[in-house]
Amino acid sequence: MTTTLSERATSGWVSALRPDRRYLPVLGTLAVLALMLVIGGTRYDNFLTPIVYSNLFINNAHLIALAVGMTFVILTGGIDLSVGSVLALSTVIIASLLQAGWPVAVVLPVAVLTGSLIGLAHGVMIQVFGVQPFVATLAGMFFARGLCFVIAPESIPIDDPAFTALAGWDSWMGHFRTTAAVVIALAVVVIGFVVLHYTRFGRTVYAIGGGEQSAMLMGLAVSRTKVLAYVVSGTCAALGGLLFAMGNRSGYALNGVAMELDAIAAVVIGGTLLTGGTGFVLGSLLGVLTLGTIQTVIQFEGNLSSWWTKIVIGVLLLIFVVLQRALSLRKT
Amino acid sequence: MLPRRGRTPEEPAAFEKGFNVTTQPVVELTGITVEFPPVTALAGVDFRLYPGEIHALMGENGAGKSTLIKALTGVYQTSSGTITVDGAEQRFSGPGDARAHGISTVYQEVNLCGNLTVAENIMLGAAEPRVLGGLHWRKMRRLAAQHLERMGLDIDPGSSLDSHSLAVQQLVAICRATVGDCKVLILDEPTSSLDADEVESLFAVMRRLKADGVAILFVSHFLDQVYAVSDRMTVLRNGGLVGEWATADLPAGELVKHMIGRSAQVLESVERGHDAVRPDAGEPRLQAIGLGRKGSIQPYDLDVYPGEVVGLAGLLGSGRTELARLLTGADRADSGGTVVEGAPRKLHTPRAAMAQGIAYTSEDRKGEGIVDGLTVRENIVLALQAERGWVRPLPRRQVDEIVAKYIDQLGIRPADPEALLRNLSGGNQQKVLLARWLATAPKLLVLDEPTRGIDVGAKAEIQKLVSELAGEGMSVVFISAELEEVLRLSHRIAVLRDRKVVATVDAEGTTTDQVVELIARGNVAEGDAA
């Protein structure tokens, strides 16, 4: 009774010592990621280098933010299809407001809060009016994308000095390069983890995924939590837009098309069940890194079309969903 | 409006004899009426609950037990009457509000979240300890462990809830209900899915809570359980109050009479019917030869003759349901085969079985039986229509005839074809389910726990119906956790143990004890072998 399952429930990093079934999907993701890195490392000389790892985070910082928000929503058993469009909207708002001469300290909160508001609207539609999450966020997806074009149909470059200074900030730890965007993305992961595991709100998110009716009868604040989950997702999507703008130094209405699907894929590959109730933010981070590694491998291959990335992701997604199905079948 | 049944003058006297009334009731309901126009679900019911007692609420399905509980906990609005808690009039806005006033409810289904840990399921919501605004996991597990210990439960509070048996989950639900200031504990059918041992440990917990001064409102369909554990009982019938008695003063026969409003003749006639009907010899209607499925049930042989009732006896999890599911194509067998009326047939899907006239009603009434968002009419014709194919809809007049016939024949209440099934009581839902399969005129009907969680009256009616159907030549495979019921209804009994058919015996001349012996002896044999 010294090492009980309970202790590992809170500290994920010890789980590898004696895997609990709850962590199997995440461990599976970790194994796939390791396999990818080994394959890459044996095939290409300069694959296992700090630069590649750094770029993995730098290129996918925005997707990490999206995946964290998406994890909240999927854990409740819902889905958020709007995150790609909200990301684009956020980049457009940032770029156009900066162009108009607004200060960065005002622009960034405005952009992020816009995402929160859209999330709030989703949550209210879903919880108060009983609209299916799929439909409500689909509406939000079209709305946000349309709004982008209303604000600015063309790509707007960002040359605000304060913003470029922020976006250009980086720090070298040995050969590892960290940018401001990566720091923000990892902060989002940490905050997401703490909120999900150490707050009543977070545990209620899990409870709703486990059984909404039960959670309600347990006296948990189901309505509020469900609405908040979409607010979290909207906020994370807008933050993702900020990170994307930091990477591209521009805002464009066609940014992040179909990126919601990448986010969902990352979350599912990271071991979160689409039916809700099971999954971890750290898994979603691994999911994003797995997707990034696939892309990197295909880039290294050189003569392969980048669309191969999609095919590999599709196959991987299929394997993971089947794997989860097998796990849950064994459970019953 | 239903007539209000007042308490007769001698009843309070009988009550005082059995219980000390100098204490103030912790909960007192006076003249509670609940209406769902045009239905009156409760008509002017009085109810008193004293601290430190176990009070059984008795009545048939649809008598108003659940309605009373829901009126008390604020789920339903009362149209008249008062609710007094600790001397002060209260009107709760919902279960959460009632809970805050010390009234907790544990339902028949475990309403907890299986994906969370045991500790969370006990503590989360109101009582969880916090540190720096976040959850204090270590303290939460420690407190949960203390509560579990109080219940006599030794499980790891950090394990996830769905890794435990249903019984343990039920006890965890009770554990949750008693955290904090719990004055009144309402247990709505907590025993319906528990084994005898598990029921005993539940009773032990109930007695412990009672000794602590908690008032327990207990609802159960098992009369022996009610007599084993309760101090007093209140009987409801058709939404009205019949009376309140000290348990010791009310013999079981009297209780049943009060509950169903007529004597237990129905029950007796079933027993007589059993002797009257003998199956014809001849070709078996269905033969299972070496039918089995890995991890589910070991290969078994079973013959069912026309007009015969074959009972399946065994403990919970002995493979009763698994056997039935293979027989009816609900699960796919990986060995053996089936012969229907002399011809080998593959029954790989319920649809294939239906085509051979084999119907199956699942034990999971809610999940695999009824469609609760459809009406009684739609539910009844569902299987018949599926059999015809969707391109040939049944003529509406024919549908109405069939539905009217079964509502009448099975006594489905309310007798309204357009009532939504979710608004019917469990027993009536079961009858609708039966009607659905009877409408397809099956040759073999497999009934998995058709009488579980339903009241004495409906139970007797279903038992009688089974006897009659067999008398008309239908073959029936009857599964029930209650051995007496299996013995009374069946001609032959297949005894299961550890996912294996260990014996097949004639019901005639076999006693319950002998069947228990058969179930148990297998265990002993295995113990010796190991």
Image (spheres, coloured by chain):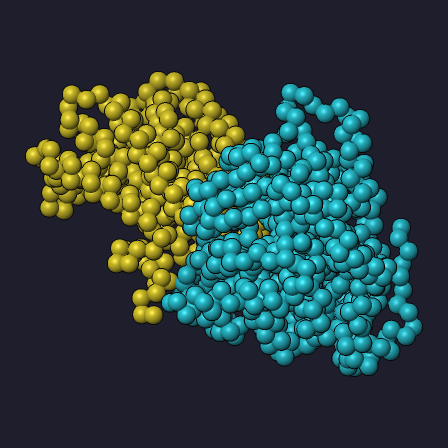
Say whether residue B121 is left or right of residue B405. left
> Farthest front residue?
B282
Instruction: Give the answer, above or below, for where A148 lies relative to A57.
Output: above
Q: Residue B504: x, y in percent? A: 57, 56
Q: Residue B270: x, y in percent? A: 77, 56
> In the image, which lettered chain appears yellow?
A
> Farthest top residue?
A154
Residue depicted at x 71% and y 72% = B227
Residue depicted at x 33% and y 42% = A270
Residue B160 can be seen in this image: yes
Query: Which quadrant of the view contains residue B15?
Result: bottom right
Front position in the image: A113 or B372: B372
Say whether residue B417 is left or right of residue B453. right
Say whether residue B321 is left or right of residue B43. left
> In the image, which lettered chain appears cyan?
B
Instruction: Give the answer, above or below, for where B431 lies relative to B457.
Output: above
Query: Which quadrant of the view contains residue A95?
Result: top left
Query: Which quadrant of the view contains residue B369?
Result: top right
Residue B61 can be seen in this image: no
Residue depicted at x 65% and y 63% = B510
Front position in the image: B454 or B422: B454
Q: Residue A13: x, y in percent? A: 27, 55
Residue depicted at x 65% and y 42% = B282
Q: Residue A160: x, y in percent? A: 28, 30
The count of marks equals: 0
Instruction: Give the answer, above or below, for where B129 lies relative to B76.
Output: below
Say whether residue B173 is left or right of residue B72. left
Quarter holding the C terminus of chain B?
A: bottom left
Front position in the image: B333 or A17: B333
